[in-house]
Amino acid sequence: MSKQRLVVLGTVSAVAIFGLSTIGSTAAEASSGRTLVIDNSFELVTADPGHMFEPTGELVDNALYDTLVTFKGSDLKHVVPDLATSWSVSDNSKKFVFHLNPKARFSDGTPVTASDVVWSLKRMVNLKGNPSFLLAGESISAQGPETVVMTSAHPNPGLLFILPNPATGVLNEKVVTAHGGTDAADASTKDTAQNWLNQHSAGSGPYVLQSFSTTSQVVFTANPNYWGPKPAYSTVVLRNVQASEQGLDVERGTNEVAVDLSPTQAKSLSGVQLKQAPSPNIFFLFTNDNPKVSTTTSNPWFQKAVRAAINYQSLLQLAGKGSVQTPGVVPTVFLGALPSRYSTKTDVAAAREDLKKSGISHPTVSLAYPTGIEVNGVSFGDMAARVQQDLQGIGITVNLQPESVQVALQSYRGGNEQMGLWEWGPDYPDPSDYLVFAPGNLVGLRAGWTAADAKGIAILAQKAADTTGTAARQSIFETFQKQLNAHSPFMPLIQPAQVVIATKSVKNLAGNGLWLVDLRNLG
Amino acid sequence: MTPVGLGRFLARRLGIGLVLMIGITLVAFVLTHLVPANPAAANLGQRALGDPAIVKAFNHEYGLDKPVVEQYLIYLGKLLHGNLGISEQSHRPVVSDLAEYVPATIELALFAIVISVVVGVGLGILAAVRRGKLIDGLLRVFSLLGVSMPTFWVALLVFYVFFFRLGWFPSGGRLSPGVPAPHAITGLYTVDAVLHGQWSLAADALDHLVLPGSVLGVFTIGTMLRFTRASVLEVINNDYVRAARIKGLSEWTVIRRHVLRPALLGIITVSGVAFGSLLSGTVLVENIFAWPGIGQYAFNSAVNLDLPAIMGVSMVVAFIYIVVNLVVDLLYSVIDPRIELR
């Protein structure tokens, strides 16, 4: 082909592409009013609150549904009213009474009643899905159209911190029943509303669901019948974007928020606003306390040596600005956290001494951890390498044992790892969630720590579960964590940083440990 | 080629294809069951896992509590009814998941193949015709770069330059945020939008295709370029080509009529292979450009041990390879009537 023809062809193609792209961009301005775009690396399965228990799902259902009480902004230490304007708690934390706001309305205009609340919560429990454990053991009933009562056989002082979870979101009973929903005891086999709830919302939140995809995007439009302050945006689009691209998207965007960046990624951006706070996820190390798994790791002096040998500051440097050393297993951002002055200090000399006392010559252990996942931008592999280095420094040989996450989870849950590097993300923001680390409990057993090994701490954990009153709980959970720091096979490491960034046009930006970003107050 | 001969050929190929598909299901089934991990553990939350009643219900729902051979036979039985099972991660029929994701990847792969054939073949011819000159050398270097640069690196580079720095194209997804998809006929947004007469929507969809499609095409352009150049060089020195030139035909006509036709056989073969590998190579590109195709779906299924989804994807990819190979073989007989299909 002649040069002339080539040039003409090239020009025509270029013009066509650019012409089309300008036409294409006008298609985006289809909706009137302000549109907000939120970029998130999706962990999303469903929009049905009764089945939902994933990070992105929390964001979605927080926008669509109301709960009895909720959190505001980034503060996870204090609950504020949502559907309930006031509540009372019995002294033994066995009975909770909630008084509903008579102004509350569903998106179809009908009032939110106590019977809707009771139906929704019972359904969540009876569906036997991932969130049903949240209200296990609670008897829920309505006393009149505006009062909900919850009673339990055991004290449940953490209940107020469990209820903000959007999985307890209140559904419009009439509408969902009409589409196959049920709260009966056999709901796990008889309820068929999930598919409908993945396409439509039946809640009282500021937004309603326009479209839902677990892989590309979720679109919300403003609820015209919202009973609270008018939402700032007419359309919100939640997009599935990898963390590495989120920063560039926001730098170039108009009204855009991104929630998954690590501090390192956020550092290089300019012209955006940034909120950085310690995440409620904790990384921790454990040495298996079961002598059948390893006589080395179950040696108490070895455990002490490991605890003192770790260079916590170096791990903070790895996680980036905004991360903190976690003093005990309860994250610093929750009630019941251990004050930072009790954080374990690195003491290499003491570590060497402890190792000598253990009587083990040439200690060699394997350290298992999952690959292919990152938590708040931190990879387990990087962390494990630093731990290996720290322990090598006092004479312990560590063989790294990376495994794909599903395979690693098997050995971890089976209690078969000699040493493990894992993380715990809170089920709800209350210290009682961290009793899983007690001997004989969920995570304790994964480290081979049985109740028989540490009777005193096991009894203390049981007592902490039943203690009521904020001051008393703070005190007993501090004691629990101090005991763990001295005598348990767990070494809490760090809380990475949770970073939210947005274009400067977005007001009231606040990250939230539970639902990633406080969408309701944005504007 | 007689109609009877063609019929027999198609029947044979169909038969072989069926056997292949069943073989694929067996291999995929065996391999996924060899992984030492547990789908219930992969798909239930930590707390739900601690409740034996919930685990039992999950295993029962997905037939995981039966012996392996029985599970396979049940799967085959359902397959014959067009039922690919329920995905353990999305809780939807695998068929619905695939119906959503396969067209997205096909649209991307088609775009990539079209531009790589047009550009690759065009440049390959140019390189052959100007053999030994500077342009030939430059094009050969370009093709080498195309096949050696890692796809994800090219993707990130393209993303940075063309979206972030220049703002010429959008960052990802199939459409701009909030824009609703056209009513599905083929599942290919560009085609569907055109069929509905929604021109600005078609333009938006095309706009979003350019970057990921081009990145996918880069590798194929490189391959096409080299291959076309070699095919053309093989033919260009033949006597009949020289005769055509002497006759006074323009260079372009000589190439089109006498050089391209013989070289086309090889080009079609490479295109067929390239299309198949494009489909499997989309994981990284889909990831970076947030393209909701089967690459991402396959990856997520593998990580989450979603057995029905893994089997479903394996079947789809096998099917596509079989169809593409069939099309290539049929095209052979069209291009070169001397070839007989058996």
Image (cartoon, coloured by chain):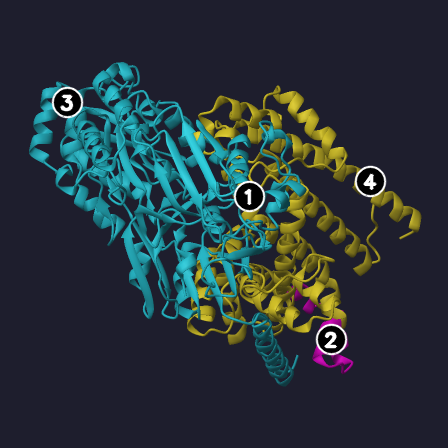
Chain colours: A cyan, B yellow
Name the residue type under label 1: Asp
Q: Residue at x 92, y 50 (%)?
A: B3
Q: Residue A266 falls in which quadrant of the image?
A: bottom left
Query: Which residue is under mark 4?
Result: B12
Mark 3 and mark 1 on one chain: yes
Q: Tell me, for residue A48, which label it has, or none.
A: 1
**Which chain hosts label 1?**
A
Q: Residue B145: percent from the left, percent from the top? A: 48, 62
Q: Quadrant of the C terminus of chain B?
A: top right
The CA span between labels 3 and 2 is 86 Å
Mark 4 and mark 2 on one chain: yes
Q: Are marks 1 and 2 in contact (CB under 8 Å)?
A: no
Q: Nearer the viewer, residue A17 or B268?
A: A17
Q: Are marks 1 and 4 in contact (CB under 8 Å)?
A: no
Query: Which residue is under mark 2?
Result: B254
Name the residue type under label 3: Trp
Indicate whether residue B237 is drawn in magenta.
yes
Q: Is residue A508 above or below residue A316?
A: below
Q: Are there few (<14), some (14-19), or many (20+) residues within 10 Å of tag 3?
A: many
Q: Nearer the viewer, residue A441 or A12?
A: A441
The CA span between labels 1 and 4 is 49 Å
Inspect this view and state whether residue A236 appears: yes
Query: Which residue is under mark 3?
Result: A301
Name the residue type under label 4: Arg
Q: Residue at x 31, y 28 (%)?
A: A92
Inspect this view and state whether residue A362 appears: no
Q: Are marks 3 and 1 in contact (CB under 8 Å)?
A: no
The CA span between labels 4 and 2 is 38 Å
